[in-house]
Amino acid sequence: MSGKISGKVIGIDLGTTNSCVAIMEGTQPRVIENAEGVRTTPSIVAFTGNGERLVGQSAKRQAVTNPENTLFAIKRLIGRRSDDPMVTKDKGMVPYHIIQAENGDAWVEAAGKGYAPSQISAFILGKMKETAEAYLGEEVRDAVITVPAYFNDSQRQATKDAGQIAGLNVLRIINEPTAAALAYGLEKKKAGTIAVYDLGGGTFDVSILEIGDGVFEVKSTNGDTFLGGEDFDQRVIEFLAEEFKKENGIDLRKDRLALQRLKEAAEKAKIELSSALQTDVNLPFITADQNGPKHLNVKITRAKFEQLVEELVERTLPPCAAALKDAGVKASDIDEVVLVGGMTRMPRVIEKVREFFGREPHKGVNPDEVVAVGAAIQGAVLKGDVRDVLLLDVTPLSLGIETLGGVFTRIIDRNTTVPTRKSQVFSTADDNQHAVTIRVFQGEREIALHNKILGEFNLEGIPPAPRGIPQIEVTFDIDANGIVHVSAKDKATGKEQQIRIQASGGLSKDEIEKMVRDAETNAGEDRKRREQVDAKNQADTLVYSTEKSLRELGDKVPAEDRTAIEAALADLKGVMESEDVDVLKAKTEALAQVSMKLGEHLYKAAQEKTAASAEAAPEAEATQPEASDAGVVDADFTEVKEDKN
């Protein structure tokens, strides 16, 4: 990162279910409310029948009636191939279409068009950017964006691409648990070992950190990038669908509209059962058969819900054990357990964490906002506004290359502090081999193909020599974002080949630039559409108030003025559906000018009314008999009710 950062730096938590944006105001972080006045925004993008793109709450509101074009939980697809087992699993869980892009990546389809997950994420990031700009009253360019700690290189790169498409300069990609620890540690200002247990909408992470003297050092991290609130919702959906099928013989999962209603009801039930012991799921007219409409009405107790999701909660414990082992600490060495993510409000999750770590989890941070706050703090650190804070993060997965026999040879081990750079010398496998193919993998399996392939490249022009003689130095460089850069060099010739790992798929530079241009074009169209809506609303309001005033004043408006106003009204009504904003504004202004006369007449009428009231008052006083309590009788009364029948 070079050069001074001049403007504000925003911190964005790009979540599976909800996203959040924060900034630093002086020494205090502030979470920014969106246009609806809410501090988190649903990570949902929808495309309507008339081609309009909706992001956030407006997209969520219409999901039931437009399920195939409403995209949610996109974070689970970002940086993944379409043949990834997790993507295959996701296809059966969502009502929209997941398709295979030309390069083999998982994309989504909406309104007949294919979109990269980075593009959909860019629309959400763009919304967060707008939210911050509306609050600050200035353009925002620089951002720190968070990702799950267990995200691999392609997922990190795809998230960075999303920021670029949204028109942001991504200063840093940081891990969500690390961001949460930053927010927690800045407030606490005390040394110790902490565990961050982060169970969000779509991913699970656990990180062990040492905090002291402003240094936040991640000792280890572990997790599951396909475990979160969405899976808990899915268990409830399956239960509701099975109950309905038992009773009515109809499988609601085959009906996209019904499935979307089930999804919303499941999420609501899950949230309610964090505080209530029982909830009713009531969905009238969920479907129909030859006998007429069918209604779903199912009671779910907290005990039943816990039984449905117990296996999911249990799945969070092995990563916790692995993280402790890698950090070289025991559960009893942990001074504080910080809970992050909406799912950590669930009593059973809190109970499991308490049992595992042997201590009451810390509940002093807002699990929905703490990650964005940490990102904002890191932004202020990078800008130089916050000093005496040093963040030392780690790479979550081992990095290496495929060597003879398909073996995975590690060059950088997992939980190595980043940024880092390591080299290793390899040789050729055959006599007179003039080129070698370097295949780069990330993961923990011993056989290379069982790990995630990040990419491959060729080093050519090696002078003829017996096998084992050429010296090829492979260097891995992981930057502070956790993004990998690899180079290979023939030590004899000095020939070097470098690659930016492009996730054996991923978006090319040209594709990203095209998406940036599309986003800019769309931003112009969005602004134009908003201008049209605003102009139409203003015109609508003026027509309504003018007609109302004309009715109220009646014959008090001189015929000449009434004719002019009615002509201007007719002119404006004639262009109300016009796409030309300038024409609409001009006609609105023309009506506003002539209807000013109405204001004069209204004012005059009000004055006359006041004067008449003032004259009538003394007369009324003169005829009013003197009030006296004498002769006042307390009478019994009976209320007479009208017969409404």
Image (cartoon, rainbow, N blue to C red):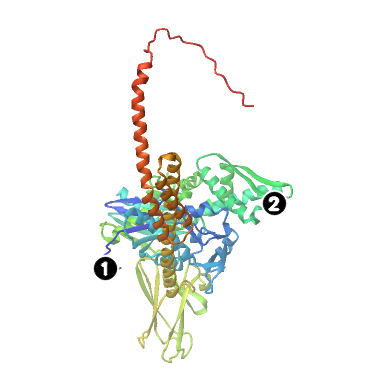
Kind of residue at badge 2:
Ile
Quadrant location, the C terminus:
top right
Q: CA distance from mark 2 to mark 1?
A: 63 Å
Judged from this view, the residue extending furthest toward the front is 559
Residue 20 picture location, percent across and down: 41, 54
**Pointer 1: what residue?**
3
Q: Nearer the viewer, residue 431 or 62?
A: 62
Mark 2 or mark 1: name the one nearer the start of the chain: 1
> Measured from the top left, where is residue 3 in percent x and y?
26, 68
Task: Mark yes or no: residue 322 visible.
Answer: yes
Q: Nearer the viewer, residue 456 or 171?
A: 171
Task: Check the image and report above or below for 597 versus 65.
Answer: above
Locate the N terminus and report the quarter of the image it occupies.
bottom left
- Residue 174 vs 334, above or below: the answer is below
Q: Residue furthest top?
A: 631
The x, y position of residue 141, in whole percent, is 34, 63
Labels 2 and 1 touching (C-beta < 8 A): no
The answer to whether one can see residue 191 in this image is no
Work out whether residue 352 or residue 539 is closer to the camera in this orientation and state it: 539
Disc 1 element: loop
Q: Quadrant of residue 604?
A: top left
**Which residue appears at 56% of the width and 66% of the height?**
112
Q: Helix or strand or loop: what does disc 2 sit on?
A: loop
Residue with the mark numbered 2: 250
Q: Position of residue 215 (x, y in %)?
A: 30, 57
